[in-house]
Image (cartoon, rainbow, N blue to C red):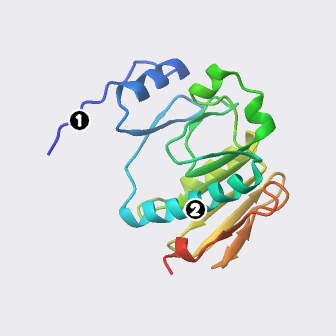
């Protein structure tokens, strides 16, 4: 068994959080708007496969449309409320991405993605994921999906609306945020 030493700065500011991430690249870390450090364990193999299907389908649609940039679960975003978050999959429109400087693109992009997805792992509690989805909307996300593979349920989050719960859908559409995108859920459900 390998011993891992985690170096934590006394005050976890944005700058120190970035330093912490660079000093510990093998860890999956997030920072709340209050500066609290959130450590996330690596996903299991099945969740990794599901996340690959999810990101792959989103990437393929974006390759066809060229309408923005797709990000995987290892990408951090610095949200307007000060939190640093890493959704399981995300998309930012081409216009918003182009408005960032080269320096802003290198680090945690200082924006909330237009579209975010959180994929519930078997070990995840639902309430923190629901709170993350609400946080994304409060910071500018226009559409979000919380995919709960345990319950075969999806919560669709839209700005200014209550989440819409869908029981075991076969697919989801990107609506007006991702026109023409259809996520086939069979591979994500494990069918």
* Whole-number angstrom distance, CA of label 2 to CA of label 1: 31 Å
Per the image, the residue denoted by label 1 is: 4
Q: Is residue 25 above or below residue 51?
A: above
Q: Residues within 10 Å of mark 1 (few under 14, many from 20)?
A: few
Q: Residue furthest left?
A: 1
- Measured as percent of width and height from the top left, residue 140 is found at 76, 41
- Measured as percent of width and height from the top left, residue 160 is found at 84, 52
Q: Is residue 159 above or below residue 77?
A: below
Q: Residues within 10 Å of mark 2 (few under 14, many from 20)?
A: many
Q: Which mark is residue 54?
A: 2
- The reply to whether residue 142 is in sight is yes
- Residue at 54% x, 70% y: name it: 188
Relative placement, left or right, of 65 versus 59 is right
- Residue 47 is drawn in which quadrant? bottom left
- Residue 175 is drawn in which quadrant? bottom right
Q: Earlier in the sequence, mark 2 or mark 1?
A: 1
- Measured as percent of width and height from the top left, residue 61 is found at 70, 59
Relative placement, left or right, of 125 versus 26 is right
Relative placement, left or right, of 54 versus 94 is left
- Residue 151 is drawn in which quadrant? bottom right
Q: Which mark is residue 49?
A: none
- Measured as percent of width and height from the top left, residue 30 is found at 50, 37
Relative placement, left or right, of 58 versus 40 is right
Q: Is residue 175 above or below residue 141?
A: below
Query: Which residue occupies the foreground of this view, 185 or 86?
Result: 185
Circle 2 SS class: helix
- Residue at 37% x, 60% y: name it: 44
């Amino acid at each position: 068994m390998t011993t891992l030493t985690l170096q934590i700065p006394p005050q976890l500011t944005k700058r120190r959080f970035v330093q912490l991430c660079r000093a510990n690249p093998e860890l999956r870390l997030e920072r709340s708007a209050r500066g609290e450090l959130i450590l996330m364990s690596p996903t299991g193999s099945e969740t990794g496969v599901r996340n690959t299907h999810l990101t792959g389908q989103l990437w393929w649609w974006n390759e066809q449309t060229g309408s923005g940039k797709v990000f995987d679960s290892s990408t951090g975003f610095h949200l307007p409320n000060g939190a640093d978050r890493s959704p399981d999959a995300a998309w930012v429109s081409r216009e918003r991405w182009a408005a960032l400087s080269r320096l802003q693109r290198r680090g945690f992009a200082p924006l909330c993605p237009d579209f975010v997805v959180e994929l519930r792992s078997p070990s995840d509690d639902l309430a923190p994921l629901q709170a993350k989805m609400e946080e994304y909307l409060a910071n500018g996300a226009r559409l979000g999906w919380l995919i709960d593979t345990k319950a075969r349920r999806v919560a669709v989050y839209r700005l200014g609306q209550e989440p819409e719960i869908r029981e075991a859908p076969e697919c989801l559409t990107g609506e007006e945020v991702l026109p023409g995108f259809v996520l086939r859920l069979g591979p994500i459900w494990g069918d």
